[in-house]
Structures are given as C-alpha cells and as structure tokens.
Image (cartoon, helix red, strand yellow):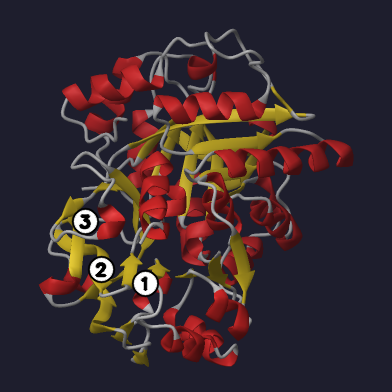
C-alpha cells in the first residue's frame, strides 16, 4: 500500500490514477498510523513553498515523514521534492524538512539567457548523472514533464538526473531511501509510469 | 531544452467528439476516450478538451468523460468551454484536468483570472483568445468572430498575464479553417509583448506549416490543431519526426 500524503496541497487525481494504472494499492491520507503501515510514501505538492511547509506542519505530516525515514522509500514530487531540502528562497527564506542537504532557488535569477521563459514548463530530456533505482527503466531518450519556477541546488552526489535549460536543472535526487523528482511522473506519459513502477519496486 | 509541443484539440458535445472521422485502429472515433488514447500513443504532448455543450446534463457527461480520460492517459490535460466561475475551475480540476482555459468568461470578468491564479496557481490558468484583424488592428472577438469586442489583442494578453494567466492560446479567426498556415504576423505581435508560453492555433494545413511556425516565431511554444489531426491529414507521429529532422526539438515516442 502506497500512502499519498494529503495535506491540502494540489490535485491528487492523476497521481492516484497513475498508481492505480500500474496496479498499486493507494491510500490518500494524513493519518499517522496509516502512513506507518504503508510500504511507500509519496509527498506531492503544487503551489508556494511557504504555504505547503506550513500545511505540512499543521497536519503533523512533517513528523510523520521524518519518523519513517530509513524505514521505507519516500518520494517527493515537484514541490514535494523541494520540501525535502534544508531551505527554500521562494519569497523569503523558509525551512524545509532537511532530509537532503541543499537549497531551493529561483530559476530566473540564475538564467544567463533572460529570454527564456519562467516557469520552466513543458517536456525536457532526462540526463542521468548517477544511477538511481527509480530511473532503472528510463532510457537516454526519455522526456518528462515539468512546471516550476524554482529549482534545487544540492551536492552532485545527491543528483541522479538533470535537464538542460540554459542552466542545469536538478530533475531527480536521492539520499538513501529518500527520492525526489522535480518533474511530474504522473504527467510524463508512459515514461512517468515506468518511474513510478520503479519507485514502488524499491 | 524544452521541446516544442504538439497539441490536438477535441471538441466535445454531449459526451461525443464533434467532427470525428474514420481512423484505423479506432472502433468508435467519436468516443473521446478512444481518440485521446490514440493521440497519446501517437505522441501528443498535451490534450485540449473543449466542452461545447450548453445543457447541464451535457456538462455532467463531459466531467465523467474527463475522469475516464484522466484515469487512462497521463499527459497534461487542458479543459475549456463554459468556464465562468471558480466553481467551474473546481469541477474540472477535481475530474482530472491540469489546466483550465478561459475565454469569454474572463472577458466578462477579468478577476476570474486573478482569483483562479491565486487559488490554483498560474500554471493552471490558460487564457484563450480569439482575435481577428479589424481596421489593421488585432481585436479580440467572441462567438467565433461574430462579435467584435473593444479589446486590443496584445493589451488583453498583457493584462491577463499580469493578472496571473500562465499560458496564452491565440486563435486567429482570420486563418481559422483556411488551412494556409498559422497567423505568423499576429503571433509575432503577441510574442514580442508577453513572456508566458504561447500556443498557436488556427490555420495549420500541412506539416510544413508547423515548421514555418516554429522557425518564424521562435518564441511560440506549441502548435494546436483539431481537424487536420481528426481527419488524419496529418499524423502526429509523422509530424514530430518531420519537425525533428528539421532541427526543431520534439519529444518523439
């Protein structure tokens, strides 16, 4: 049973449907016991970092995640991935879960070619930089779907894939059993389903 | 880099695809779920569903179809047609839409854009503009071009993006259905002034029209079309292969 953490952020329809599509049992929950029983945890998220971090705390889901670190695979998606880091500089400075060293910074501030549009939205090609079990079924020709204006900067050892957008944007990360994807696997077509399948096989 | 996107658009009335034609390998071409699956297999980067139903029952049918499509196909889905309130946003987002496109609903009440962007995020709010040339100016029109508004197309697009629209679909009524290529002049006028993604719509007649679009107006992010895909004048997989061979970045599957 995969637990999708429900803390009032974003639309969970596609994530739920995509996991069902690959034959996985899903529970959408903010119940600590149910999360403790789950085999895998997914932390979704869309919107602003500050609001999401607050909601996570309000629902006591920050502690629920921390309690399960090392016990079962955890996957953060999009803003859910950004929440795994120490700090975000999205409209101020905000504290994350601190499960992967690094910070979340503005794409716009770091672009050299200022003509490029932000958000970084659309399909971009995954470039694998370190082996990761969640990418075991992806190839060098796979594209995944992004929508975001901030990106994670973390030591190379935690980065498992990047994409090129004038700068190198962190696409997926790993620290032990903690995984994160900046892209939306549930919106990345058949390739995204392979990534979710690989995650539930972890 | 980001790929250019190819987006087929499906008009739905009373739960059926309007203008459905014979496709090989599809039993029921006017079944939106079947057609959506087909386009997904061909490599469509996104799908747009327009609800052109007027009745309440038709609306409900549309929502249940959306749920079916969103349970089978895992690429971005945009929904438009009859979006006038935040409740309309809510209804289609809960049924699996990722983006919601507003047109005349935003002309009537521009704060719909702001409220929706604040509630759901800009990435979720698409402004769709129908425009045509009136006295050498690009004017916003409604009712398929029958009603001309006071709005200047570029000024409206800028205002909407300031209010929070995260993407703009520009449909040239002058070129719509003519199949002589996209309205490059109109698109250029828009792309010079806004920095949100722009989707070109109206006028595609063959594969070369897409190449000319992306070569001539590099800031255009996507090309949208309906009938040329439905009538299979262009196959999406072939189109993407052709564009890739012409050095336009494409996701080919």
Location of residue B124 with respect to B218 vertically, above or below: below
Mark 1 and mark 2 in contact (Cβ < 8 Å)? yes
Residue A6 visible in the snapshot = yes
Callout 3 secondary element = loop
Q: Is residue A113 left or right of residue A173?
A: left
Kindly report the distance in space between the C-alpha atoms of the residues bearing marks 2 and 1: 8 Å
Residue beneath disc 2: A173
Q: Residue at x 78, y 33 (%)?
A: B53
Along the horizontal axis of the image, is B128 left or right of B136? right
Identify which residue, A19 or B228, lies in the foreground: A19
Q: Quadrant of residue A179?
A: bottom left
Q: CA distance from mark 2 to mark 3?
A: 28 Å
Circle 3 or circle 1, nearest the eye:
1
* Mark 3 nearby-residue class (10 Å; few <14, some 14–19, many ≥20): few
**Residue under circle 1?**
A81
Name the front one of labels 2 and 3.
2
Name the quarter where the C terminus of chain B is drawn.
Answer: top left
Q: Which residue is mark 3?
A: A115
Q: Which x, y percent locates residue B199?
A: 42, 40
């Amino acid at each position: 049973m995969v637990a999708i953490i429900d803390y009032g952020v974003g639309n969970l329809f596609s994530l739920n449907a995509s996991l069902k599509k690959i034959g996985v049992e899903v529970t959408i929950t903010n119940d600590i016991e149910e999360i403790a029983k789950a085999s895998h945890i997914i932390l979704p998220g869309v919107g602003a970092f500050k609001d999401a971090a607050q909601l996570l705390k309000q629902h006591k889901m920050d502690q629920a995640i921390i309690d399960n670190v090392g016990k079962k695979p955890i996957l953060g998606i999009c803003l859910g991935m950004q929440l795994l880091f120490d700090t975000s500089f999205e409209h101020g400075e905000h504290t994350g879960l601190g499960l992967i060293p690094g910070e979340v910074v503005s794409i716009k501030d770091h672009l050299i070619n200022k003509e490029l549009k932000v958000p970084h939205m659309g399909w971009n090609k995954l470039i694998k930089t370190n082996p990761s079990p969640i990418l075991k079924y992806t190839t060098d020709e796979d594209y995944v779907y992004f929508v975001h204006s901030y990106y994670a900067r973390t030591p190379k050892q935690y980065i498992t894939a990047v994409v090129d957008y004038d700068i190198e944007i962190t696409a997926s990360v790993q620290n032990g059993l903690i995984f994160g994807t900046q892209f939306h696997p549930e919106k990345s077509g058949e390739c995204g389903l392979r990534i979710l399948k690989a995650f539930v096989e972890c | 880099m980001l790929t250019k996107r190819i987006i087929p658009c499906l008009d739905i009335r009373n739960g059926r695809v309007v203008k459905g034609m014979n496709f090989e390998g599809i039993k029921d071409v006017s079944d939106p779920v079947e057609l959506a699956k087909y386009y997904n297999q061909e490599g469509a980067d996104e799908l747009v569903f327009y609800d052109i139903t007027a009745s309440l029952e038709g609306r409900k049918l549309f929502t249940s179809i959306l749920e079916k499509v969103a349970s089978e196909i895992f690429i971005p889905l945009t929904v438009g047609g009859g979006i006038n309130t935040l409740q309309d946003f809510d209804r289609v987002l809960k049924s699996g839409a990722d983006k919601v496109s507003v047109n005349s609903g935003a002309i009537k009440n521009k704060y719909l854009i702001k409220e929706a962007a604040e509630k759901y995020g800009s990435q979720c709010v698409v402004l769709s503009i129908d425009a045509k040339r009136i006295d050498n100016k690009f004017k916003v029109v409604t009712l398929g071009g029958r009603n001309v508004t006071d709005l200047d197309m570029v000024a409206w697009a800028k205002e909407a993006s300031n209010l929070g629209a995260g993407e703009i679909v520009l449909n040239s009524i002058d070129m719509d259905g003519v199949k002589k290529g996209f309205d490059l002049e109109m698109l250029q006028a828009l792309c010079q002034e806004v920095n949100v993604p722009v989707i070109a719509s109206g006028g595609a007649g063959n594969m070369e029209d897409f190449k000319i679009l992306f070569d001539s107006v590099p800031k255009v992010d996507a090309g949208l079309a309906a009938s040329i895909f439905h009538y299979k004048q262009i196959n999406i997989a072939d189109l993407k292969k052709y564009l890739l061979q012409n050095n336009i970045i494409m996701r080919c599957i």
